[in-house]
Amino acid sequence: MLAAYPAPSRQAARVRLISCIGTYFRRFLPPAPWQLEGVEVSVRGARLDLVVAHSSGDRFSDDIKTGRLARAIDEARLEEQLDR
């Protein structure tokens, strides 16, 4: 993913990416006994960005939207994705 950036911009992109990941985990990942189980997990008809599991066996997934893509997604596409 970062290889598409020129070398000087790659370092800046890496720092931004690491910062965003840290912020997400600090603000949104639930506390123990929940734990990250998988990233980009393929399921029938979709790919889940993050899968989080509880020691009880419960699971949930989080579909992360970032940058311009997040603004470009229309409501109908979001509703269709939620139905899956």
Image (cartoon, rainbow, N blue to C red):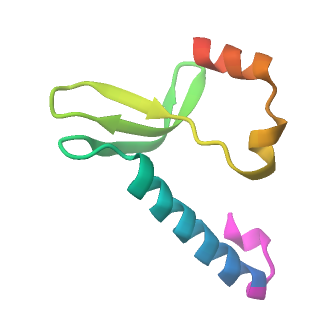
Q: Is residue 73 above or below residue 18?
A: above
Instruction: Measuring from the top left, give residue 26's x and y in whole percent.
Output: 40, 57
Say which quadrant the N terminus sits in: bottom right
Residue for point 68% across, 74% down: 13
Q: Which residues are magenta?
A: 1-8
Magenta-colored stretch includes residue 32: no
Q: Is 64 on the left or on the right of 73, as rendered?
A: left
- Would you say residue 2 sits in the magenta stretch? yes
Labels in figure, total? 0
The residue under the point 44% across, 31% down is 61
| Quarter where residue 73 is shown | top right
Residue furthest to the bottom: 8
Nearest the eye: 5 or 56: 56
In the image, taking residue 6 as reference, residue 24 lies left or right, namely: left
Does residue 26 appear left or right of residue 18 in this picture?
left
Q: Nearer the viewer, residue 43 or 61?
A: 61
Predominant secondary structure, magenta span: helix
Kindly indicate the quadrant of the structure image that contains residue 3: bottom right
Residue 26 visible (yes or no): yes
With respect to residue 56, does 79 lie above or below? above
Residue 16 percent location from the top left of the image: 63, 71
Q: Classify 27 as above or below 63.
A: below
Q: Position of residue 29 (x, y in %)?
A: 37, 46
Q: Residue at point 49% right, 60% down? A: 23
- Picture residue at 20% right of the left edge, 26% below the top: 57
